[in-house]
Amino acid sequence: MTPRYGCVVLTAGRRPEDLRRAVASLLAQRDVELDVVVVGNGCEPAGVPDGVRVLALDRDDGIPAGRNAGVPQVGGELLFFLDDDAELAGEDALARVAALFAADPALGLVQLGPQPREPGGRRSRDWVPRLRIGDPRRPSESTVVWEGAVAIRRAAYDAVGPWPAEFRFVHEGVDLGWRLMDAGWRLRYAGDIPVLHPSPTGAAHGYSYYFGARNRVWLARRHLPLPLGMLFVASFALRTVPRLTSRRALQEAARGYRDGMRQPAGPRRRLRARTLYRMARAGRPPII
C-alpha cells in the first residue's frame, strides 16, 4: 500500500521564491501519495504551482495556529509540515520517512535533518535536537523538535492534540514532542534524510526574546514539577543572557518572563515519571 501524506506548507507570503521551491520539492516525491495545501498565514500566497490548493487565512494567529488550520484540509494517515523556507533535498525523502513509521508502530513523529542551503553555510544549533550534536547527519532518538520539516502519524496528532496555538512562535515543537512522549509515542531525528534551509543570519528579532522567555516559562508551568521547572527556566535564562546585547532585548526577555508567570499557561499536563526517565535515557532531561 502506497503511503499517503497530508502535507501542510506554511507561509507568511514574504518568500514567494522559497515557497515555490518548497512546494516543488514536495511534488517531486516518489512512491508516496500527497495531498498538499499551502496555508497563507494572514496572506494570499504567491508562488504556488498550479493545481496546489491554497488556504488563505484572514489574519496571522501565529505559526502553530497556521499549521493546525491546514490539517483538516488534507487527507492521509501521515501528516507532513513544511515551512516555506525549507525544501526536501531528495525525491525519496518522504518514502524513507514512511518506511520508518511502517517499521515502528510506536513511532509518532520524525524530524528531518536540516542542512544549510548555501555551500559551506552555517548551521543553527537548534537544528539538531540533542545535546551532543556530533555528526548532524546521524539519526537518533529525540525528545524535542525543530519544527521546519516534521512528519507526524495522524493517529498520534489526533490523540495528543494539535500544535499549541497559544505559543504563537518558539518552543511549540517542545510542547508537542513532550505530549507525544507522555502518551507513549517515540520521536526520531532523521538526520540522514536532509532538508535544505537557509543559514541563520544576524541576531534574533526582539519578538523572539519575548516569546522565547514566555513560552519557556509556560512549558515549565504546563508540564514539569516545580523543582525541574525552576531548573528548566533558569538554564534557559543563563544560556540566553549573552545574547541580550541591547536594552530592547533585555526589556523583551524581562517582559516574556513576567508574562509567562502572570498569563494563563494553558492546561496543566504534568509529565509522568516514566516520561522524564525516557528523556534522561535519551540524553536530554527536561532541565536544558
Image (cartoon, grey):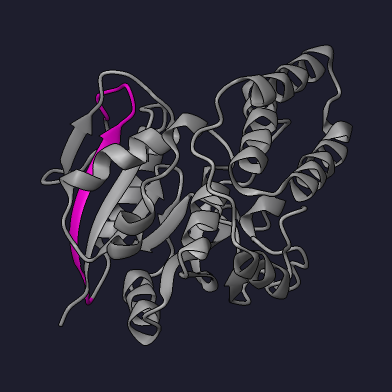
Location of residue 205 in the rendering, given as x and y in whole percent from the top left corner: 66, 25
Q: Who's the residue at 32% across and 45% down the image?
A: 9
In the image, which residues are magenta? 31-45
Q: Position of residue 196 (x, y in %)?
A: 50, 56
Q: Residue at x 59, y 51 (%)?
A: 270
Residue 26 lies, with reference to residue 253, above or below; the image says: below
- Give coordinates of residue 71: x percent, y percent: 25, 47
Q: Is residue 208 left or right of residue 74?
A: right
Q: Is residue 50 above or below residue 244?
A: below
Give residue 261's quadrant in the image: top right
- Locate residue 47, reporting x and y percent: 27, 36
In the foreground, 194 or 288 = 288
- Residue at 50%, 66% (x, y): give it: 194
Tell me if residue 229 comes above or below residue 62 in the rendering. below
Q: Nearer the viewer, residue 189 or 216?
A: 216
- Does residue 217 appear left or right of residue 107 in this picture? right
Q: Is residue 25 magenta?
A: no
Residue 155 placement, left or right of 229: left
